[in-house]
Amino acid sequence: MVEGGIAKADKTEFTECWRTTWKTPYIMRLAFSAGIGGLLFGYDTGVISGALLFIKEDFDEVDKKTWLQSTIVSMAVAGAIVGAAVGGWINDRFGRRMSILIADVLFLIGAIVMAFAPAPWVIIVGRIFVGFGVGMASMTSPLYISEASPARIRGALVSTNGLLITGGQFFSYLINLAFVHTPGTWRWMLGVAGVPAIIQFVLMLSLPESPRWLYRKDRVAESRAILERIYPAEEVEAEMEALRVSVEAEKADEAIIGDSFGAKLKGAFANPVVRRGLAAGVTVQVAQQFVGINTVMYYSPSIVQFAGYASNSTAMALSLITSGLNAIGSIVSMMFVDRYGRRKLMIISMFGIISCLIILATVFSQAAIHAPKIDALESTTFSPNATCPAFAPLATPNAPPSGWNCMKCLRSECGFCASGVQPYAPGACVVLSDDMKATCHSKGRTYFKDGCPSKFGFLAIVFLGLYIVVYAPGMGTVPWIVNSEIYPLRYRGLGGGIAAVSNWVSNLIVSESFLSLTHALGSSGTFLLFAGFSTVGLFFIWLLVPETKGLQFEEVEKLLEAGYKPSLLRRRNKAKGVDTA
């Protein structure tokens, strides 16, 4: 027995999920159809990273203004905050299926607006619409899957949503590469998102509502009919009885506090079970973002360029590797989340993330220190009016100013034309412009504006990939699983909505500030800052998040009702003679 009198779940292996879905393919159909929302979520997260490189080429104001680049990226996140908040109410009021259908329509509108955008502000409007859809899908898809899944394989099936998120990111990088040399590049990249939205909309029209939501709305016969297609015949009655007990308790609660949104919100925070669930659910969602993952996914090609790879195509090709590793990590999560548990996977993942972030900070620091020097003679004679304005007053042909290297040049908002002899030799610090880039290329040399040629660039790519490998199986998918199963039925939409809003607010803060942070602190300082945030997140996950693997929803509720403390604190309290139950 575990604390609170809940029986430990039987060890469930990955093969059990496939055995069950092979015997009952209807379960996989439900999970896959709803999981396309995750695919859309992932596609939007990944596609903007490549599209932004070409949007900057089409619109000079975007190329020159870092805040405008950040706004284009982060406005989808701002829309997702609203989508997640409203989505929680729509989920409880109109059902999970209707929420997914609405999200698909919003995705489609946003994709069309972006594809035909004549100006940056129109792209931003399209990003906001896509954000509405992403916010609703991010909380609704795992919720729908969890409520339509047998408890023993629920974690693995909800992980399919995570797999489709990472699969969507990988797909977005493939699409980005496919359209690199196509007229309209970024328009195609952003517009393709409308296709899976249409597919999911059609599929969801033929699928039922969540059986738990139907039971909550007194549509008992419909609920039973769906459960009979999901569970073996001998388990249906037990599942119906568990639903009856849960719903009766919630209706009694509703009779006391009322059914309005305000009353439900007040009731949620007055309920110790919901409060403890929110403490755990919000903790894992905030921690997921403050490890810095979406800076990697939104700005992956830019980070690769920071590491010294100047070509857009090369940056996106290398980013494809990190995205592929993310998808593989989601498969690993599916294999182990129901075997080893949610809590253990997240804690192991966080230790790996912190280690990789510290190493990345070190690598980028060394890359900055050992960046190629500036050749003062070349910088002043490269071509007429070519010298970097910040460098020109300080330079004399035989005495370059102290402390100037490629990194100092770029931080002065100039460009670096690498040596034509060998890539790490001193080069020219020149003005930042498309004409100068063309002049540099015409001499058979490489023009850098986001990062410097570095012997450490390869290490940065290796540890960026390793960061993804340790992130994906734990912090990548498990927070969504935890939030799909940790709230009582009556508060599941509201609780999931609050947690999703916390995720997207954190995402907005991180994605909006990343480019500014790298400008102020450098890549090294930024990754070190994320390592600090990750350490704080690890502590609160250890302190607040219980293990829920294999438990029925009603058992999770009893676990939270009894209260949760980590085993270390329980041992200390027992040693002092304190009752922790």
Image (spheres, rainbow, N blue to C red):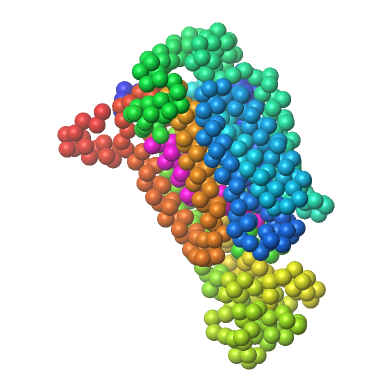
Q: Is residue 210 above or below residue 200?
A: above
Taking the magenta stretch, the answer to whether it contains residue 291 is yes
Taking the magenta stretch, the answer to whether it contains residue 285 is yes
Q: How many numbered discs?
A: 0
Q: Nearer the viewer, residue 313 or 114?
A: 114
Q: Is residue 561 visible to us here? A: yes
Q: Quadrant of the C terminus?
A: top left
The spot of residue 306 in percent (x, y) is 61, 63
Q: Which residue, as the protein is rendered here, is positioned at the far left?
A: 577
Q: Quadrant of the N terminus?
A: top left
Q: Nearer the viewer, residue 342 or 121?
A: 121
Query: Is 104 left, or right, of 272 in this rendering?
Result: right
Q: Is residue 235 above or below residue 128?
A: above
Q: Quadrant of residue 430?
A: bottom right
The spot of residue 534 in percent (x, y) is 44, 51
The spot of residue 261 in percent (x, y) is 46, 26
In this picture, which residue range is highlighted in magenta?
279-301
Q: Is residue 173 visible to us here? A: no
> Which residue: 37% across, 21% down?
257
Q: Nearer the viewer, residue 449 or 6?
A: 449
Q: Nearer the viewer, residue 230 or 516?
A: 516
Q: Is residue 150 above or below residue 573?
A: above
> Which residue: 55% across, 27% down?
90
> Which residue: 57% across, 59% down?
515
The spot of residue 258 in percent (x, y) is 40, 20
Dominant SS in magenta? helix
